[in-house]
Image (spheres, grey):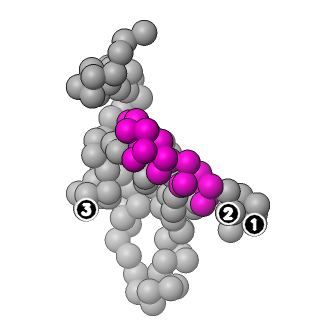
Amino acid sequence: MQEGSFSLMQMAKIASALYIHQKDKKLLYISILTSPTTGGVTASFGMLGDIIIAEPKAYIAFAGKRVIEQTLGQKVIEDFQVTEHLFGHGLFDLIVSRNLLKGVLSELFRLYGLPRK
């Protein structure tokens, strides 16, 4: 695992801060996942957004394919950790390429009634 103990302990603090941000203060949290998004980010704040956006063909996983296959004792399909496959299973709200991201975010902010600066 790439994250050290200190980093793993911070995940709980981040999740707690996000809870306050979203529930108590009623603020919007949009998570944008790029390639690669792995490990602790996938296990915590990357998946806690009110809206989760992923870029096309991104590699998004908690653990690598080899680790999962060894843990399950079976083979998994080739692209099971790619955005389009995960989207089909409901993991994200939108798939948006980087060149369109600014416009999509502007529209989401407008829909949520956030002021334009």
Q: Name the residue at 36% across, 51% down.
A: 83
- Label pair 2/1, CB-CB below 8 angstroms: yes
CA separation, marks 1 and 3? 31 Å
Q: Which mark is residue 5?
A: 1
Q: Name the residue at 52% across, 85% down.
A: 70
Of 68 and 90, nearer the camera is 90
Residue placed under numbered mark 3 in the picture? 89
* First in residue order: circle 3 vs circle 2: 2
Percent across and percent down for residue 112 are 27, 28
Q: Which residue is outermost to the bottom?
A: 73
- Foreground mark, 1 or 3, reads 1
Percent across and percent down for residue 11 are 61, 58
Quadrant where the N terminus sits is bottom right
The magenta span reads 11-28
Percent across and percent down for residue 4 are 75, 63
Label 3: few (<14), some (14–19) or many (≥20) C-alpha neighbours in 10 Å: few
Give the secondary structure at mark 2. helix
- Foreground mark, 3 or 2, reads 2
Q: Which residue is outermost to the top?
A: 117
> Would you identify the image quadrant in which residue 114 lies?
top left
CA separation, marks 3 and 2? 27 Å
Quadrant where the C terminus sits is top left
Give the secondary structure at mark 1. helix
Our reading of the magenta stretch's main secondary structure is helix
Disc 3 marks which amino acid? His
> Would you identify the image quadrant in which residue 40 lies?
bottom right
Q: Which mark is residue 8?
A: 2
CA separation, marks 2 and 1? 5 Å
The reply to whether the magenta stretch includes residue 13 is yes
Q: Name the residue at 50% across, 85% down.
A: 71
